[in-house]
C-alpha cells in the first residue's frame, strides 16, 4: 500500500537467547491504532501495512519486565528494531 510502512524485529533476553511467544503491541501514538503480534520460534515479529507515524512498541513475556520502545515509521520503509528484555 502506498503511504504505509512496516516494522519487524527480534526479541531476546539479556543473554542473547531469543524469546518465543512474546506479545508485541504496536500502537500509533497519534491515532491510537493498535496492532498486536507474537514472536515466533526465532523470536522475530513483523507487522506490515501500518500508517506512517510515531509508534510505541511494548513487549511483554512471562518472567520478563515489560519493555517500551518508541519508533518513527516512514513511507515505504520496514523499520527493524531489536528488543532486549530484562528478567522481572
Image (tube, rainbow, N blue to C red):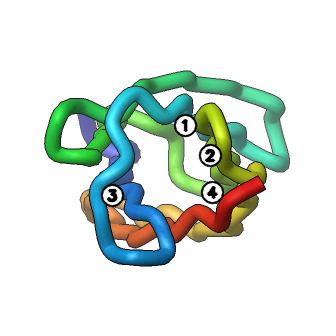
Residue at 83% in and 47% down: 30
Question: Which residue lies under the disc numbered 4?
Answer: 53
Q: How many marks?
A: 4
Along the polypeptide, which appears first: circle 1 or circle 2?
A: 1
> Circles 2 and 3: CB distance less than 8 Å?
no
The vertical placement of 26 against 72, above or below, is above
Along the polypeptide, which appears first: circle 4 or circle 3?
A: 3
Along the polypeptide, which appears first: circle 2 or circle 4?
A: 4
Q: Position of residue 50 (x, y in %)?
A: 45, 37
User: Circle 4 — which element?
Assistant: strand
Q: Residue 24 shows which numbered tag?
A: 1
Q: Position of residue 4 (x, y in %)?
A: 38, 44
- Spatial CA distance of label 1 from label 3 is 10 Å
Mark 2 surroundings within 10 Å by alpha-carbon count, few (fewer than 14), some (14 through 19), many (20 or more): many
> Circles 1 and 3: CB distance less than 8 Å?
yes
Q: Residue 9 shows which numbered tag?
A: 3
- Spatial CA distance of label 2 from label 4 is 19 Å
Along the polypeptide, which appears first: circle 1 or circle 3?
A: 3
Residue at 31% in and 41% down: 45
Q: Position of residue 43 (x, y in %)?
A: 27, 46
Question: Which residue lies under the disc numbered 2?
Answer: 59
Residue at 71% in and 43% down: 28
Judge left or right: residue 54 versus residue 38.
right
> Circles 1 and 2: CB distance less than 8 Å?
yes
Farthest bottom residue in view: 15
User: Circle 3 — which element?
Assistant: strand
Q: Residue 55 shows which numbered tag?
A: none
Q: Quadrant of residue 47?
A: top left
Closer-to-camera residue (11/6): 11
Closer-to-camera residue (43/81): 43
- Spatial CA distance of label 1 from label 2 is 4 Å
Residue at 74% in and 59% down: 68
Amino acid at each position: 500500500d502506498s503511504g504505509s510502512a512496516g516494522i519487524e524485529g527480534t526479541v531476546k533476553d539479556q543473554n542473547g537467547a531469543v524469546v518465543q511467544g512474546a506479545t508485541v503491541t504496536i500502537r500509533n501514538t497519534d491515532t491510537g491504532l493498535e496492532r498486536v503480534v507474537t514472536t515466533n520460534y526465532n523470536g522475530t515479529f513483523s507487522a506490515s501495512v501500518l500508517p506512517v507515524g510515531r509508534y510505541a512498541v511494548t513487549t511483554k513475556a512471562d518472567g520478563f519486565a515489560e519493555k517500551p520502545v518508541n519508533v518513527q515509521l516512514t513511507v515505504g520503509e520496514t523499520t527493524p528494531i531489536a528488543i532486549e528484555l530484562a528478567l522481572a
